[in-house]
Structures are given as C-alpha cells and as structure tokens.
Amino acid sequence: MTGTWTTLPVPDSSTGTFTADVMILLTDGSLLVHNGYTSALDNASQWLRLTPDHNGKYETGSWSSQLDMNFARQWFASGVLRDGRVFCIGGEDSTAGSDTPTGEIFDPLTNQWSDISKPSAFDFVRGDCNGSVLADGRVLLGGATPSGPPPSWSKRTAIWDPRTDAWVEAGLKFGTLASTDKKDPFEEETFVLLRDGSVLAPAVRDTPKAQRYVPLLDEWVHVHDSPVPLAIDTLSGVGVFETGPAILLPSGKVFVIGGTGQTALFAPGPHLNSPGSWTTGPVFPPDTSASPNWPTLTALDAPACLLPNGKVVCLGGATEPDAGDYFSFNPIFLEYDPHNPATTLPLLDVQPTLPAGNWTWQSCFLLLPTGQLLCSAQTNQLFLYTPDLASGLPHHDWKPAHIEVPECMAPGHSYRLSGAQINGLSQAVCYGDDAGMATNYPIVRLSNPISGQIVYVRSHDFSMMGVAPADLHGYEDRHSCRIDIPSSLPLGHWDLVVVANGIASDSIRVRIATRCEEDRFVGKVEALTYDRFGDFESFMLETTSGGVHQFYSHEPRIGDLARRAWQERARIAVKVDPGHPQRPESISFSV
C-alpha cells in the first residue's frame, strides 16, 4: 500500500484565478491561504480561509470570502502568535514598495488585517526576511539585504514583542555590545527553533558555517561547521546564494537540507553555548537530465514537513536558470527516514501531478491536524497527501499527554486547558527564508460519539511556544492555553483531543451543558489513605479530564463509599463543599 494524493480546488478571487502559495494553520483548525504573485502584484494582497466540514475533512471544507491585506506582499516572514493572531512582515515584492519593511496582523475573530507598529530604526527587517516565534512568544526576525555585493550584506537581527509592540536589536548581549555578534549575514538564511529555545541558522554566504541565537544570553553563539556545504554560492558565474529548509526531529537533532542537494544532521550540545556537532546526511538523487547544471537534484528555496510518523517529506528539482538566477525545476517529492541508513534520499511512495514547468520555490507545505500534508504550487489547486498508516505511526511518547480540562463546559464560554507536549516536539514545517508555516501550538478537536460530528474549537493565549519534550511519567512540564467553546455547539457528551503537529492525545470525555456545576468532579478513585490508627483520611480521584484531585474526610460514610469505588473500579461523581473544594459532601455511583 502507498499513500494517496487528492486535489482540492481553490475558488477564484475577485480578480480571477487564485494561485495559492503560503498556507497558515489557524488555532481553530481553519487554514489561511495566500494568493501568490504570478501575474499581477495586487493579487498578492488576497487571502482565503478554508474551514473543514462537519466530518473534519478539509477536502470538502468551505471557503470564506476574500480577506484582503492592506498591502500586497510576496515572500515574507509569517507565523502564528501566542494569542492566536497571525503576523506577516516584509515582502520581496509589495505594493508598499519593493523589499518593504512594513507588516500586518490578521485577527481570526474579525477576519481583518491591521498594520504593525514598527519603528523606522528597524527597517533593516524587510523584504524576504525570515522569522521564528520564540518559546516566550516574541519573534526573532532577520534583516534581508535588498541589494549590494555579498560582503556588504546585513548581519542585523531584531526581536519583536507582539504584546507590547516593543522592538530591540538581537545579538547585542542585552546592550553590552555596540553591534551584533552575528558573524555571517542573515540574507537567505533558514531559522529553526530548538528544544532549548535557541534558534539554529546555518550560513548561506559563509557556508558551511553556522550559529545559534540564544535568547537567554541575547547572543549569537558559535556552532561547529557543517561537514558539507549547505548553500550554492555561485554557479556558472551567477551568484545563487540559496539553501533549503531545516526540520527539528523528535530526537532533538535537526535535519538540515542544503540547497546543494546535500544534507546534514545537527545535534545541540549540553549547554546553551555549546557548539554542538554535525554528521553527514543522505544526498539527493542524481540529476539524470541530459546536461545537468549540478550533479544532484537541489532544494534552492523549497519546503519540508515532519510527518506524524517521524519522517520528513521534502522537494528536490533539477538546477536550471530562472530569471538570471538558478533554482530547482520540476519538483520531485523525497522522504527522509531517520532510521533508514540509505545514503541517497528515496522518493516518496507516490508522486502528485504538479503543474508542468513548476519550480520548488512555488510550493509550500502545511501539516494538518488530521496528520495529512497539504501542498500548494501557485495554482488554483491544493494537493493533499494522506500517508499510508502501514508506513508508520507516531511513537506514543510524542503525543500530547496529561490533558486537563473542565469535565463540563458551557457554550459561549472560555476555559483553561493544560497538559504536557501540547505544542509538539518541532515547528514541523519549514520553507527556508521566505515564508513561515510552523504548527507548534495546540489544536483542540471535539468529536461527538453519537453523530460523529467533528468540531475544532479555538485555542489561544498559549503559556509558551517552545518545543521541548516533557517528562511523561510525572506531572511537571505542564503548559496551558485557553479554549473557546462555540455558542452553537450542541449539548451533550463529546470526546476531546489535543493535536500537536498532526499527533492527537488520548481522548477525554467532556460534557457540554448550559449550566455546569463547578463543585462536581467525575472520575475513578486511584488511591486511599489512612492515618496511623487505621482510620480513613483521604482519597485521590483521577477525573475523566485527566486531572488528579485529593479529597479529605473523616466521615465513615465517605470512607466506605470511596473504598467501594476503589474496589469496584467504579466511576463516581464527587460533590464538594463550594467553600472547601477538598471536602466531599457526597459520592454518587450513578454516573
């Protein structure tokens, strides 16, 4: 068996054919899709929103009306913020001016774009800049250089705090340096967030060098050189200076895909300022065309995605001239398996039919909450890959775990959800320097056990945006968010899961009701405690939402009921004194 590809038609915009490229997963499970600049620049202000249907399927979902930015922009930094809004900064091409430094924010509650307040002192963040949302929710942004020879390229980077709209230059060691300690220019570099909260940036102009930005030190620290060059600097007298994407693996290593068709694996060291280590990865397949310009296929601006099974899908193409430059032509889908010792990357099990004459730079990837891979190609279709389950499932330690949420929730209200690994173990999606589509935030899905209806509820106000694994055997490393229960959600029981990078937690049964009793807990008794005289003292209840609560009582009646519930492994409802939430008033077995 192999995976399958399905096409999703994209409706026309107000100006004609919608040629989709950048795609962003919103925190309510819907998608924001950008209209690429293929004919008229004005079209690149247009976005559409795709909402999955009542079965949770994107291929039969519904499209919104057109959602226009204030300015058209093509190739820019983008991502989802802690509060669930979306940012876009820069634009190599823009109606705000070529290599614009401007930016905008999309509010998913109003479907409106608004301008970002950005001081002119930070206009070096411009054009096809790149960005990465840091673990604390701030955004690291690189400063692209629109013109000039490579020795003159800017090395400056900035940090933007969306909560306060404050901007500071990065890499100054909190103001103790007069200029950045970044050694190589940012131009065309790829960012990837690591477990320790630092950001790896393999060099392009100065390949095979690399550095990491460490927010806790406000410092660009030294990283050992890659064992292979990861960018093509010049080819046939043409300055190329392009590279590919990089993906953090569940193991903590980074799979770095060079524009050269060579790959390398970076392993961070034990300390924040450790230089780490590299090993050589598999190479791309050879270019078998009649007169190849490069010996292997390459990834000169191309996407990659970490599938839930731990494998990475990426694109490669033949190196061909394009508008005075070189890029990768006629894309081929490749797959990296960390457990496969092959020295050449194999092809993905099945290939879609992309438009003839496509380049890898025209495609973007997005990982859906369903575990499917969505691919754009600057055409009026999206291409949906469903992996064959026989090719592998996520390791159980990769799942979001220890999910806690109220057992009862009311439509139209907001609640706190917490758990471990709710952001996943990677940003999961990468496209070199020109676009951001990371999915490291919790997506909450409700399934009705009777009707089969699936509803995604909006999550927001994430306690952190990091990708560090948790201790799944304890109750440390918990993080949280808020979830909004739709006013129209039908009442009754639902099964709730938290999805991170296409990997779902174990389900939790919750109840949607117009009125919820805050002093009622449902679950099973996990432990009983007695004092040194043998008298009942307390019991521990694991609730249906995954929480653990300790209740104290010296009443023999409560002790007898708790012991019976423990012996029978029965599900009970515990009613507590509202003024003393650890003191049970009654225990009921009719749940």
Image (spheres, rainbow, N blue to C red):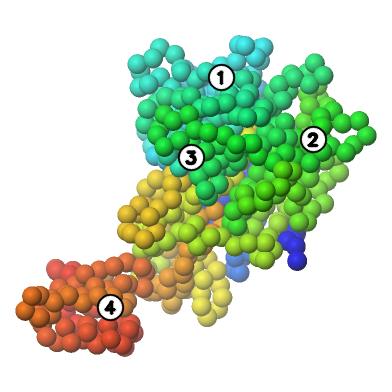
Is residue 495 among the parts visible in the rendering?
Answer: yes
Neighbour class for label 3 at 10 Å: few (<14), some, many (≥20)? Answer: many
Residue 402 sits in quarter: bottom left
| Residues at discs 1 and 4 in contact (Cβ within 8 Å) | no
Neighbour class for label 2 at 10 Å: few (<14), some, many (≥20)? Answer: many
Q: Return the residue at label 3.
A: 194
Q: x%, y% of residue 435?
A: 61, 36
- Return the residue found at the far front: 341
Neighbour class for label 4 at 10 Å: few (<14), some, many (≥20)? Answer: many
**Residue 296 marker:** 2
Please tell me which of labels 3 and 4 falls first in the chain. 3
Task: Give the residue drawn at x 70%, y 32%.
Answer: 259
Dot 2 amino acid type: Thr
Q: CA distance from mark 3 to mark 2?
A: 29 Å
- Return the residue found at the far right: 290
**Which structural element holds mark 1?**
loop
| Residues at discs 3 and 2 in contact (Cβ within 8 Å) | no
* Quarter that holds the N terminus: bottom right
Mark 2 or mark 1, which is nearer to you?
Answer: 2
Q: x%, y% of residue 29?
A: 55, 56
Q: x%, y% of residue 278?
A: 57, 34
Mark 3 or mark 2, which is nearer to you?
Answer: 2
Please tell me which of labels 3 and 2 falls first in the chain. 3
Dot 1 amino acid type: Asp
Q: Return the residue at label 1.
A: 184
Judge by depth and name the residue closer to the eye, 284 or 44. 284
Residue 20 sits in quarter: top right
